[in-house]
Amino acid sequence: MKNNILKNFKNMNNVEIKGRSLWVDARIRYSKNKMATMCLFALICICFFSIFGSFFSNYSIDEIDWNILGMTLEKGYPSIQTGHYFGTDEMGRDLYARVVQGSRISLAVGFIGAFISTFIGTLYGAISGYYGGRLDSLMMRIVDVLISIPFMFVLILFLVVFGRSILMIFVGIALFSWLGMARVARGQTMTLKNKEFIEAARATGVSEFNIITRHIIPNLLGIVIVYGSLMIPGFIMAESFISFLGLGVQEPNTSWGALISEGAGTMTYGTIWQLAFPLSFFIVTMFCFYFIGDGLRDAFDPKDN
């Protein structure tokens, strides 16, 4: 009996205990959030639709079906037989093909805008929070001045002065979108820079640039991912609003905002599908991003679990 106990004790000592990283724990906590998981799956489906949906279209985005032109209400409704799965617009163009391209452009604005703002804001905020002192005060005063300027007003003015194009939308978003991220990154950096692992890095002679890029910024990724995911719907909303006003994407290209604007203008004629399909994609995507952001916040914040 005694020998068996000693043998079991030795076996327990030989067992290798494997730890779990923050990312593994976050993934496990996120998977427990059923709504966030469902929204992630729905968003992946929408992304696949925007990328590969054009392969299933029978028409190009600017191709006019002359058999339907002028008779949209009678013949332009959604139909598998005609190949217009979402119906046609008032000009006889296939709405399915236009929704695919609109999804592609609107999602690109959201993802690219979030990437630009996250990259610039995280680096700017990490530098400001790490060095502190007068440099921090100067950098934050710049942020305060820029953040007081109405973003939407500047974006509209920018498009009017320099021309209406998707490139100008990206440039306009990049100018001001990083300010909120910079504040978040600065606050987190100020709590991290006095931690033991940062002090150890300084003691071993690691340069300040490497401390910021290899030690501080990687530890900001959790909050940065959460904040960045919640910024994406804001950028899609901004682009849709600009396109709704007619200042965004120009023909023959389109976006969700432009399609919603066109559908709202023809809704009184009974062609409800011209508004229903792009608006449905827009609303579902907004809900998905917000629930995903909420799930990521809970996943990276174990205190609430």
Image (cartoon, helix red, strand yellow):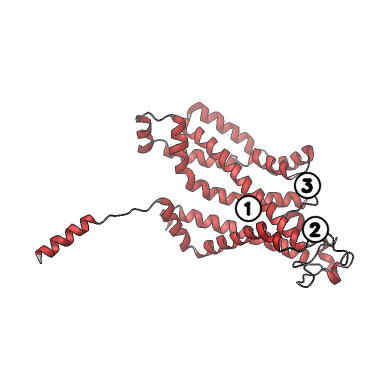
- Among the two numbered marks 3 and 1 on one chain, the one whose residue lies closer to the N terminus: 1
How busy is the neighbourhood of tag 2: few (under 14 within 10 Å), some, or many (20 plus)? some
Q: Please name the amino acid that badge 1 sits on.
A: Pro
Q: Please name the amino acid that badge 3 sits on.
A: Leu
- Residue 172: where, in percent of width, then height? 69, 40
How busy is the neighbourhood of tag 1: few (under 14 within 10 Å), some, or many (20 plus)? many
- Among the two numbered marks 2 and 3 on one chain, the one whose residue lies closer to the N terminus: 3
Q: Are marks 2 and 3 in contact (CB under 8 Å)?
A: no
Residue 247, numbered circle:
3
Q: Which image quadrant for residue 152?
A: top right
For the point 49% across and 47% down, the residue is 223
Residue furthest toward the left?
2
* For residue 86, above or below residue 156: below
- Among the two numbered marks 2 and 1 on one chain, the one whose residue lies closer to the N terminus: 1
Residue 199, numbered circle:
none
Which residue is nearer to you in this view: 103 or 257? Answer: 103
Q: Mark 1 sits on what residue? A: 233
Q: Mark 2 sits on what residue? A: 262
